[in-house]
Image: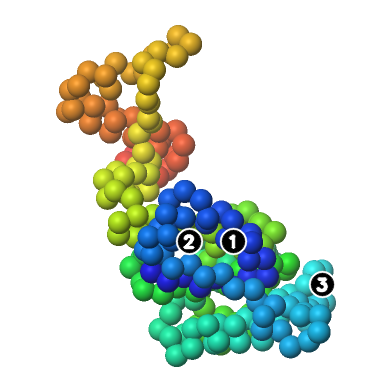
Amino acid sequence: MRIDVFTIFPAMVDAPLSESIVQRARTTGRLDLRVYDLRDWTHDRHRTVDDSPYGGGPGMVMKVAPIVEGLEAVLGVDLASTRVLITSAGGIPFDQGMARDLATVERLAIVCGHYEGIDQRVVDLVGAEEVSIGDYVLTGGELAAAVIVDAVTRLLPGVISPDSIDDESHADDLVEYPHYTRPAVYRGHPAPDVLLSGDHAAVDRWRHEQAVLRTRRNRPGRLATDTEG
Ligand code: SAH
């Protein structure tokens, strides 16, 4: 899969995606990630990417031209068929379902906002989707883009074992069961006996019960039975 990211702080996007599993996906060619500096599509000596908002108010707004021209230069005729996301605190919530959906496309582009946000005309001109990674406000969309790329990449074929993906939190309504590893007892705290019993059916039952308890505790209202009862 190819992902093109447009930002005024390329290192902020590249750094978290240059380690561990995502870095391996890049080296093996499963993820072709390219990060572009939007200042490459400015036309003035100062390489200006932002300006004060029409209508007044605080902060600066990212200009429409460098973004549209950058997308056109990099994507060319593929722009029409490429999903273009814009990071936005007020966007559609990004979740595991959207990650699964995005993992099926061949090409994706992500534009990172900064300062107060992006001139809204980018959305109309390129048919972009505004996406939020959660109900809080970041200084810029770079970390949000990294979150999206990370969540999508681990779902690409061959990046991690399919078993890990089927069972995990958000695969269904339940969050995942708790994990334990050696030693069996640490500072008087034992790992649950059942996990050391070798009885796979009992382990599965226990994990399911724990997943339900943990979902109820951490994500109340998430289970259908909670809302019905
Ligand atoms: N004035 C904006 C906030 C700007 S934050 C508002 O009230 O909605 C600066 C930039 O950070 C945004 O343009 C966006 O690209 C990014 N950003 C901030 N919070 C985000 C979030 N929760 N999800 C995705 N992007 C976010």
Q: Secondary structure at mark 1?
A: helix
Q: Amino acid at mark 3?
A: Gly
Which is nearer the N-term, disc 2 or disc 1? 1
Please provide percent x and percent y for residue 7: 63, 70
Q: Nearer the viewer, mark 3 or mark 1?
A: 1
Tell me, yes or no, whether the two marked residues, 2 and 1, touch with CB atoms within 8 Å: yes
Please provide percent x and percent y for residue 191: 36, 18
Q: Amino acid at mark 2?
A: Val
For label 3, the crowd category at 10 Å Cα-Cα, with few meaning under 14, some 14 to 19 and many 20 or more, is: few
Tell me, yes or no, whether the two marked residues, 3 and 1, touch with CB atoms within 8 Å: no
Q: CA distance from mark 2 to mark 1?
A: 10 Å
**What label does residue 57 carry, if any?**
3
Q: Quadrant of residue 98?
A: bottom left
Q: Which residue is mark 2?
A: 149
Q: Which residue is mark 1?
A: 13
Q: Residue, x 45% and y 90% (percent of image)? A: 77
Q: CA distance from mark 2 to mark 3?
A: 32 Å
Is residue 64 in view?
no
Q: Quadrant of residue 83?
A: bottom left
Q: Residue, x 40% and y 13% (percent of image)? A: 185
Q: Nearer the viewer, mark 2 or mark 3?
A: 2
Picture mark count: 3
Q: Note whether ligand 1 is within 8 Å of mark 1.
A: no
Q: Quadrant of ligand 1?
A: bottom right
Please provide percent x and percent y for residue 18: 53, 55
9 sits left or right of 152 in the view = right
Is residue 225 in view?
yes
